[in-house]
Amino acid sequence: MRLNLEPDITVVGWAKEVNQFESLYAEHKPDSILICSQFQGLRTPKYICDFASLNESAKFLVVSDSVERHLIVEFMESGARGFVSPAHGELDEMMAALRSVSNGGTYVCQKATENLLGGLFNRNQSIENEILSEREKQVVRLVSRGQSSKDIGRILDLSPSTVVVHRRNIMRKIGVHKTADITRYAIRSLLVTA
């Protein structure tokens, strides 16, 4: 990986399991920690919060393909110092984030920042346009229950093509690309229960 090629970055190890990570951390006390947003199926924000409360020098940089607004906020509130999405940025941005977090700063990638601001600085795009409408919330609930666009159209008395447009708009607004991500969004946003 390119991290190993950077003269000012030393990778002390990779962990796939919590025990492995905690051993590496105890041994090396790294300047920063890259952590996947779905580390080992844990509730990663809670893990970051709990770990950072016991290890004040731990500086987490979250790596996530998803840039959902509520997800970014949840991670940053958990104590993470940074949030980057390789799916939406260049590797150079990850290096900048890693350096910033290692030096005690914070970093949120450009795409995540755009989603957090929700069009605040774009006068042609109101913040309200980034919030799901009641109809879109209905579609999210039905998608998360495994309903097809045809089934959703029948239930909501909409044409399947209208449902497809709603799904596309929902995915754009919450910054995801897959149906499974809509379901995760629905659970995190408490639109449905797990």
Image (cartoon, rainbow, N blue to C red):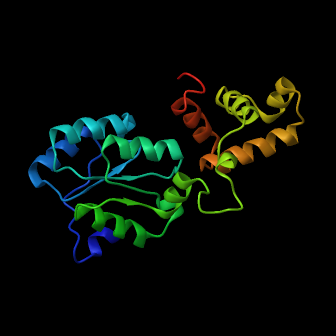
Residue at 36% x, 42% y: name it.
Answer: 77
Up-down relation of residue 12 to residue 129 (above or below): below
- The residue at the far bottom in this view is 7
In the image, 75 versus 41, the foreground residue is 75
Quarter assignment of residue 134: top right
- 120 left or right of 135 in image: left
Quarter assignment of residue 98: bottom left
Residue at 39% x, 35% y: name it.
Answer: 41
- The residue at the far left in this view is 27
Up-down relation of residue 1 to residue 129 (above or below): below
Quarter assignment of residue 84: bottom left
| Res. 61 visible in picture | yes
Image quarter where the N terminus lies is bottom left
- 156 left or right of 132 in image: right
Image mark count: 0
Relative image position of residue 78 (x, y in whole percent): 33, 40
Relative image position of residue 91 (x, y in whole percent): 43, 69
Residue at 11% x, 47% y: name it.
Answer: 26
Relative image position of residue 29 (x, y in whole percent): 13, 53
In the image, 191 versus 2, the foreground residue is 191
Up-down relation of residue 146 to residue 99 (above or below): above
In the image, 7 versus 190, the foreground residue is 190
- 133 left or right of 52 in image: right
| Res. 1 visible in picture | no
